[in-house]
Amino acid sequence: MAALRYGLIGSGMMGQEHIRNLNLLDGVEVAAIADPDEGMRKLSVELSGGTARAYADYSDMLSDDICDAYVVGSPNDTHHRVMLDILPANKPILCEKPLCTTSAHCRDIIAGAQLRTAPTWVAMEYRYMPPVQRLLAEVARDTTGPVKMMAIREHRYPFLDKVGDWNRFNSRTGGTLVEKCCHFWDLMRLVLQSDPVRVYASGAMDVNHLDERYSGATPDIVDNAFVTVDFESGARGMLDLCMFADGSFWQEVISVTGPKARVDACVPAPARFSRDGKERLSQIVISDRATKNVVTEDVSVDEAILRAGDHYGSTFFQHRKFLDLVRRGKGQPEVSLEDGLWSVRVGEAAEMSAKSGQAIKLDETY
């Protein structure tokens, strides 16, 4: 079978993580890379093996039509225009999160995809972390009973430096509670199998980026927050986010609790941000309510997969599923455009709530 030719639009930090993971898969080729930054283009071409065709403007890549599938990894605020331009080609697309920076733009994408037959998959990598997959399996086998509460704690390092410093501003990212936290709203909705109806957030920029200035502009992204989400089913979700907690033993702890048990998925920071620069195993912890037994298991992942990115192997496993879907030529993406819209809607409401101090109801306005 001929290699599937990928075209990458955006070749910064996340684009390069996509390349490293595609390099681990059989039957694929990074055929083209588009990025306006010459340095990022050069690095990414070298990373892909030196054979990818480089473009400063993705429209030239589209005109040449040398790709079988596209990966969109450009800055958040470019997704709307890029996606509208590539949807008509009717080729498979993996679009990085968030789908867009606003729910209105997400709806534009959904409307533009109505006549497509090729899959459009939103890259919610956190679903595919091996410890999260274990947590999902425990929920599916009714270990907890009906999940009533879901709590996610992410205590991590600050936003990294990006080309053009685009990730310092709400106008370009959608805000931290969209840009970073869309993963978590997606996980809550997936686990609870219910749609959010109400969001309350308290958050601020208290520590990071306070003294930074970019062309005279001051960063305005939240660096810590508590967010509560009520769901239609009556279940509740809670996020505890801190982006000045470098060195935390667990970067994420994702907990689901029902009448029978609680299950925790514990994920360490990437090796390059850990205390000793080494990879650590994640864990799954099951606390049984009736017996009071607590079972803790390590969740191992191949070292080569861990080294390929900063998301505990999830980018690799996501790409493998996306590739399987494309090869089959039928079936639906596991993460749909509607899933992408929901994650942005909740993030938008959380940003709005943090600013206003009011709970936000998720009606059709948002």
Image (spheres, rainbow, N blue to C red):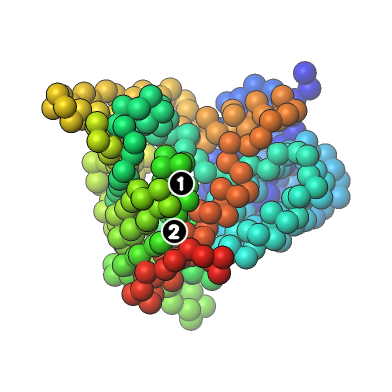
- Whether residue 131 is situated above or below residue 164 in the rendered picture: above
State the residue position of label 1: 194
- Whether residue 71 is situated above or below residue 75 in the rendered picture: above
Q: Quadrant of the N terminus?
A: top right
Q: Which residue lies at the image location 31% right of the left edge and 43% below the top edge?
A: 148
- Report x, y in % for residue 48: 65, 35
Q: Residue furthest left?
A: 292
Q: Residues within 10 Å of mark 1 (few under 14, many from 20)?
A: some
Q: Which residue lies at the image location 52% right of the left edge and 36% below the top edge?
A: 315
Q: Which residue lies at the image location 38% right of the left edge and 24% below the top edge?
A: 141
- Whether residue 345 is situated above or below residue 216 in the rendered picture: above
Mark 2 residue element = strand
Quarter of the image holding residue 69? top right
Q: Residues within 10 Å of mark 2 (few under 14, many from 20)?
A: some
Mark 1 residue element = loop
Q: Residue furthest front?
A: 233
Q: Give the residue type that dot 2 points to.
A: Val
- Whether residue 218 is situated above or below residue 22 in the rendered picture: below
Q: Give the residue type that dot 1 points to.
A: Ser
- Residue 47 or residue 364, whichever sits in front: 364
CA gap between label 1 and label 2 equals 9 Å
> Taking the image as drawn, is residue 2 in sight?
yes
- Report x, y in % for residue 333: 63, 37
- Report x, y in % for residue 35: 68, 53
State the residue position of label 2: 197
- Report x, y in % for residue 80: 67, 60
Please tell me how many numbered marks the rendered image carries: 2
Residue 4 is labelled as none
